[in-house]
Every structure is written in C-alpha cells, then in structure tokens.
Image (cartoon, rainbow, N blue to C red):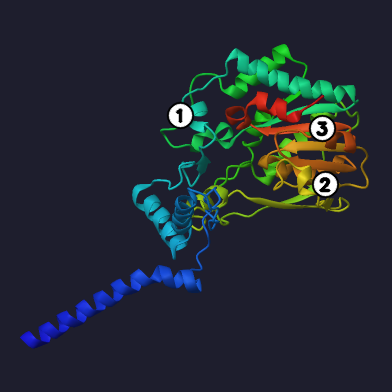
Amino acid sequence: MHAAANKFKAALNGILIALFVLFLWLPTVDTLFKTDHTQMTHENRNLAGFPRWEGGGRGIQNYLKGLENYFNDHFGYRKRLVRWNNRWRNNWFHEASHPNVTQGRDGWLYFVGYRVIENYHLGESFTPEELQAWQKLFETRQAWLKKKGIKYLLVIVPIKSTIYPEYLPDWLTRSPRPSKLDQFTEYMKAHSTVPVLDLRPALLAAKTNAFVYLNTDSHWNNLGAFVGYQEIVKTLGSQFPGMQPLPQSAFDFKELPDGSGRDLAKMLGLESQFREKHFYEYHPLPPLQPLNHINPELPANRWRKPTIHPVITECPQAQGRAIVYHDSYGWSLLDFLGYHFNRTFWFSRPDWQPEDIENIKPDIVIDERAEYAFFILDPGVLLHEDNLQ
C-alpha cells in the first residue's frame, strides 16, 4: 500500500513537472510556430516594432530597451492571456480593462478618454480667451472662403454620453455647470455670424422613436447619422435654394440586433461578450442608385498625415462640389450627403489644406466636428496649421 502511494505521488509530481515545463515552453512554441490564433484585441495604440540598431554611445542601451518593449508586446500567447485577463476583470470585478472605457447599464459601454470625465463629470469650462480663440478659428475659415465665393457650415455632433446619459454608470453624473458645447454655441450665437449646426436637438428628438447610437461603440449608428444628414441638408437649403434631404423611405434600413460588439467592446477584448443591439445596415432603394466611390492614390508628401487618404463620392445626377472636413463620425454621413453634390471630397482631418480647396473649387466647405474636439483640440494650433493667407 505504501509503495503504491509512493508510485502515485511520483507520477503526480512527474505530471506537475511536465505541465510546468510545458507552460514555460508555450510562449516559445507560439513565437516559433504561431499556434495562438486568438484575435488581437484593439488596444488603441501601435504595438512596439522590432528595434533597429542605431549605433552610437547609447546604441546598446536603446536597442536592449527596444527589445524589451518588443517582447512585452509580442511574447507567445499574449493575445490569449490579454483576453482572459479582460474577461476575468469584467466578470469577477465588473471592472473595465481599458482606462478609456467604462461599463454602463444594460450592456452599454462609454468612451471616457479625451477628457470626457473632466468635462462631463467635473464640469471643465471654457475661459473667455478660449472661446475667443475658437471664434477666431472659424471666422478666419469663413472669411477666407467668402473671398473665394465659397460657402461654409460648421456641424457639431454630440458624443454618446450627451444623448444617452441614462445608461451611464452611477458614478458618472453630469456636472450642473453648462457644458463646453453649451458655452460655445451660446457664445457663437451672440458674437459671430458663422453658421453653426448643433445636432443635439435633432438626435434627442429622434431617440424617442429609435436608438441612434451604438451601445458597444463610441459613435452614432447609421440611423443616427441619417438624422444628422437630414438636419445638415435642411440647413444647407438656406444657402442652396431647393436642396431637400432624402426621406428615410429612400433607403432600406434593417436593424441587425445582437451582433458582435464594436469598437469599445474590441478595446476590452470582449466583443463576443458585449453584443451590439442597435446596429442598422442600409442600402438605397430604386430609383436611387448607390454612389460612386473614388479613393485617389496621392503622393504621401501631399499630406501632413500620410496615413489619412481622401475619399470622393460621385453622384452624376447632382450638381456642384463640396468638401467635408470630418472626424470618425463623418464616415457615416458619406453615403447620404454625397447624393446632393456631383462630387464630394471627404478629408478626415481637423486642419485644412488651402491648396486642395483652391484646386477643387467647391461650392461649400462643411466642417464636421464631434463634441470631443472642444475637449482636446487647440484652436490656435489649428489656425496655424490651416495657414490661410
């Protein structure tokens, strides 16, 4: 009996040692043979690349530091371990694993980077000087365009917490102070002739009939973008007589509930756990035809941000040209607003490029900015980068 117990104990120890050695070697096995097929989590940053030897007195130190950073981002089975860590933190502690994401009620996720907490919860406010700087930026753009006979419209898209505060976590309450967007719109109404379209009223009205933002994403859904598009075209009607938005019946909107989680869920590595409930796909109904899309390949030196390429939408039945400077919210407007101009040029950047405006000769330039812009962008820097002479 004693001998049998010793044999069992020895066998158990052997198994434990084998498992320990296996776990030690698993990262190396994955590094060599790529056995971890787990989907990469969206970490909202670029992973460290393999370092280059630069020589010099600090060459060895920098190279070794680069190797350490590379290993930390690429060691074997890192993707699987990151996902397990994210899932356990969420399931056991109800804690978001990404500092820029917080979990609200009923499966809603919110982006809290870009100083959202400081502005929404703590009530950061503009100084008079900051408001004047924003006014100067937009009035300079408007005046420069006016000299060239080009119209201008500034469009502001509210962030999700502004339209859907009811799903925020209990700790993220709104400050009683006026928001920066409140301050800006009131100030511009009192002190400027720049046309400013605030989409908050339209989206707040639309949410009583359907969801207009995504519950696992920081953006509006396609239905919310359509509401925004209709308000933009209604406003453009005062500058382009006869311009009317397309009705919702011109498109087949189809809700696809319980889909895979989107950008915020991916940042947590939990897109299979947080399901998207409010995604709409759509396509134009006859006689409306899909727009033509053009993605010109321009030399990298034409762009201060060479990773961002312009998109052109063409509608042969329409007239005129438009330029839209936009952020990530603007992509959802592309296949709606493009029907109202023969060619619409979409530039995903906050600063302007006067040489492109002069070459394209648009009838109007539309500035689309999300509410975040007033939290993180410096209007003085943008004015300098515009270089409008």
Q: Is residue 46 shown left or right of residue 354?
A: left
Which element type, helix, strand or loop, lies under badge 3? helix
Residue marked by disc 1: 173
Percent coordinates x, y for residue 313 in the rendering: 83, 47
Q: How many marks?
A: 3
Residue marked by disc 2: 312
Q: Residue at x 50, y 53 (%)?
A: 274
Look at label 2 and name its amino acid: Ile
Q: CA distance from mark 3 to mark 1?
A: 42 Å
Percent coordinates x, y for residue 28 in the rendering: 42, 70
Question: Tag on residue 161?
Answer: none
Q: Earlier in the sequence, mark 1 or mark 2?
A: 1
Q: Nearer the viewer, residue 230 or 139?
A: 139
Res. 71 image quadrant: bottom left
Look at label 1 and name its amino acid: Thr
Residues at badges 3 and 1 in contact (C-beta under 8 Å)? no
Q: Residue at x 75, y 32 (%)?
A: 367
Q: CA distance from mark 2 to mark 3?
A: 17 Å
Look at label 3 and name its amino acid: Pro
Q: Nearer the viewer, residue 161 or 37?
A: 37
Q: Is residue 340 visible?
A: yes
Which element type, helix, strand or loop, lies under badge 1? loop
Q: Earlier in the sequence, mark 3 or mark 1?
A: 1
Question: Tag on residue 354?
Answer: 3
Q: Residues within 10 Å of mark 1 (few under 14, many from 20)?
A: some
Mark 3 or 1, which is nearer the eye? 3
Mark 2 or 3, which is nearer the eye? 3
Q: Earlier in the sequence, mark 2 or mark 3?
A: 2
Residues at badges 1 and 2 in contact (C-beta under 8 Å)? no
